[in-house]
């Protein structure tokens, strides 16, 4: 039994594991969310939330403690000036884990780690107009709506012209096949002469 053993080693040495967490925290502060395996996300979340708590506290000592996990100065400034102030009213729980299912290559469970108030850039929901009705769009080029005259009264719709009937060409009468052994329109059989042939070929 593995008693009193806390955390996951993730198949790495301590130095390798801490270096990986530093890179992930930096990417998280810079972009707002990261995609990693589920076990790594579960190990990274408490570390990242402690870093945000130090960012809420402020001060030089807090910045030095944060620099142990995130040495980039521009990211430390972003954490203290932009990220941490968003969570002043929250006592922990700054991150959420969203499961993404197994990875196609090796079947490892993937997850997305992001801030709880994360929103995609450029995606804004349109606010509904007052009264619950959307404003009608104006016609292009200042044209008036179809069916209305200058006084605002609607004109009766014009009757549609009936479509011209398609003329189908008359089918030609089928031609009668003439029998090889017959002639004439009535198809009477040919008459053979019964007179004897003259001798001598004359």
Image (cartoon, rainbow, N blue to C red):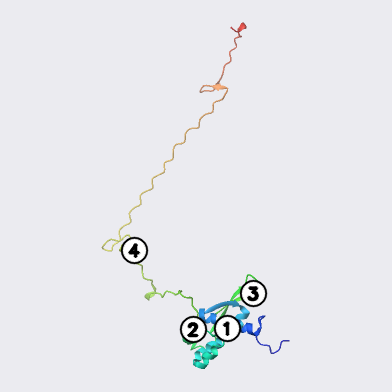
Residue where numbered disc 1 is placed: 22
In which quadrant of the rendered image does the N terminus lie?
A: bottom right
N-term-proximal mark, 3 vs 2: 2
Dot 2 or dot 1, earlier in sequence: 1
| Few, some or many residues within 10 Å of mark 3 (<14, 14–19, 20+) | some
Residue in the foreground of this view, choosing between 45 and 73: 73
Kindly report the distance in space between the C-alpha atoms of the residues bearing marks 4 and 3. 54 Å
In this rendering, position of residue 49 left or right of residue 172:
right
Q: Find out whether the residues at labels 1 and 4 contact each other: C-beta distance under 8 Å.
A: no
Of mark 4 and mark 3, the one earlier in the sequence is 3
Q: CA distance from mark 3 to mark 2?
A: 33 Å
Q: Position of residue 125 (x, y in %)?
A: 44, 74
Residue 108: image tag: 3
Residue nearest the observer in this picture, 140 or 120: 120
SS type, badge 1:
helix
Please state, as top left, top right, bottom left or bottom right, where the C terminus lies in the image: top right
Q: Is residue 163 left or right of residue 142?
A: right
Query: Is residue 91 at all visible to an observer of this figure?
Result: no
Q: Is residue 33 visible?
A: yes
Task: Tell me if label 3 and label 1 are in contact, CB under 8 Å.
Answer: no
Q: CA distance from mark 2 to mark 4?
A: 49 Å
Residue 74 is tagged as 2
Q: Which mark is residue 140?
A: 4
Between marks 3 and 1, how big is the CA–CA gap?
A: 22 Å
The earlier-in-sequence mark between 1 and 4 is 1
First of labels 3, 1 by sequence position = 1
Residue 18 in the image, given as x and y percentages of width and height = 61, 84
* Front: mark 1 or 4: 1
Q: Are the two marked residues, 4 and 3, in contact with CB atoms closer than 8 angstroms?
A: no
Q: Residues within 10 Å of mark 1 (few under 14, many from 20)?
A: some
Query: Against 144, is 37 above or below?
Result: below
């Amino acid at each position: 039994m593995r008693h009193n053993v806390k955390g996951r080693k993730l198949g790495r040495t301590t130095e390798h594991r801490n270096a990986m967490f530093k890179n992930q925290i930096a990417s998280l502060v810079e972009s707002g969310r990261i995609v990693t395996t589920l076990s790594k996300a579960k190990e990274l979340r408490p570390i990242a939330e402690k870093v945000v708590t130090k960012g809420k506290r402020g001060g030089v000592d807090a910045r030095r403690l944060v620099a142990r996990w995130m040495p980039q100065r521009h990211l430390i400034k972003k954490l203290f000036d932009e990220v941490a102030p968003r969570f002043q009213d929250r006592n922990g729980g700054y991150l959420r884990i969203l499961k993404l299912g197994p990875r196609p290559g090796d079947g490892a469970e993937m997850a997305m780690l992001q801030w709880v108030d994360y929103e995609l850039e450029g995606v804004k929901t349109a606010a509904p107009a007052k009264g619950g009705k959307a404003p009608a769009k104006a016609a292009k080029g200042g044209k008036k709506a179809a069916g209305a005259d200058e006084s605002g009264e609607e004109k009766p719709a014009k009757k549609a012209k009936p479509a011209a009937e398609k003329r189908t060409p008359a089918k030609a009468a089928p031609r009668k096949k003439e029998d090889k052994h017959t002639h004439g329109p009535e198809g009477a059989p040919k008459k053979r002469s019964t007179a004897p042939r003259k001798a001598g070929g004359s």
